[in-house]
Amino acid sequence: MKIYSFTIAITLLLTSFYSVASTQQLAWQDIDKWLSQPASIGPWKYQKTSKNNTVLHSLVNTSNTFGGGVLLYRETNKPCFISIPHQFHDKYTLTIGRALFDAHCNMLVHNTHHRHSESPDSHPMDYSKRASGIHVAAVQAFHNKYPNGLIFQLHGFNQKKRKTPQAKKADFILSQGRSYNAKLAKLQSCLMTLSQNTYIYQKDVFELGGTKNVLHKVGLAPHRFIHIEISKPMRKRLKSHPVSMEQFNLCLSYSA
């Protein structure tokens, strides 16, 4: 009887735990608190490393729970946010984003699972569509802490899949949504030192890979979110040519 009762108690406890775990979501307030008091949060484990007298704070989720993901924070860098939602599908975007983070920006989030992998909950694993988890929470916390800071999201695209001649030769396609401001025009001018085929969505081209990005729906101030699509040849060039990577980083830093 005692063993039976104990078994029932354990079963109820586990049922309760998994019920809570299946509905629990990370809030931006959790990340806001973490920025001043770093610690592990649920499946995201806290790591701290130091190099060249600077401290790197990390939250790392090695499982797919709540979408997985990694958050990096270096307080001494400039307040700008880097989003890498498709590191596996959009090859080299994490390498490019990490170089920008190491040189200039203070926050970066990247996915740890392919966007088409199986999700443990009702939300997609694709970070450009997933409305919950560390990606959206970190973006909202950043926007709350640095209301004037820019959020850069790096994507890749296949030139051959574009429909218009202009888009087929594009190396960079920049977007702030339905409209754009002087910051994006300034970024375009700077990136044209790397490629004259640098275009603004809704001005030069009207094709974009992600027009229903979740970050357009989380209450960010207008023009704070900059979506950057990079052709595969340009991604290869940035990865293998340090001078080109440095120029790319400087362009984004000047805009931030």
Image (cartoon, rainbow, N blue to C red):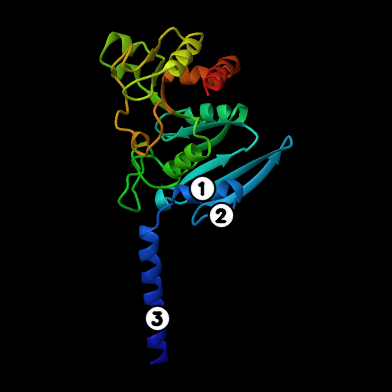
Q: Amino acid at mark 2?
A: Ser
Residue hosting label 2: 40
Instruction: Where is residue 253? Give x, y as percent.
Output: 56, 22
For the image, the number of numbered tags is 3
Who's the residue at 61% across and 51% down the image? 37
Of all residues shown, which one is farthest toward the left?
163
Residue hosting label 3: 9
Of all residues shown, which one is farthest toward the bottom?
1
Residue hosting label 1: 31
Q: Secondary structure at mark 1?
A: helix
Question: Label 3: how many residues lie within 10 Å, few (<14), some (14-19) or many (20+)?
Answer: few
Who's the residue at 51% across and 47% down the image? 31
Instruction: Where is residue 47? Give x, y as percent.
Output: 61, 49
Mark 3–mark 1 Cα distance, whole angstroms, equals 34 Å
Indicate the quadrant where residue 104 lies: top right
Question: Label for residue 237?
Answer: none
Question: Label 1: how many residues lie within 10 Å, few (<14), some (14-19) or many (20+)?
Answer: many
Foreground mark, 3 or 1, reads 1
Q: Secondary structure at mark 3?
A: helix
- Considering only vertical position in the picture, is 253 above or below 122? above
Foreground mark, 3 or 2, reads 2
Pick the residue in front: 1 or 250.
Answer: 250
Q: Amino acid at mark 3?
A: Ala
Q: Are marks 3 and 1 in contact (CB under 8 Å)?
A: no
Instruction: Where is residue 3? Give x, y as percent.
Output: 41, 88
Q: Secondary structure at mark 2?
A: loop
Looking at marks 2 and 1 on the same chain, the residue that comes earlier in the sequence is marked by 1
Looking at marks 3 and 1 on the same chain, the residue that comes earlier in the sequence is marked by 3
Mark 2–mark 1 Cα distance, whole angstroms, equals 11 Å
- Considering only vertical position in the picture, is 80 above or below 233? below
Instruction: Where is residue 246? Give x, y as percent.
Output: 59, 18
Pick the residue in front: 93 or 28.
Answer: 28
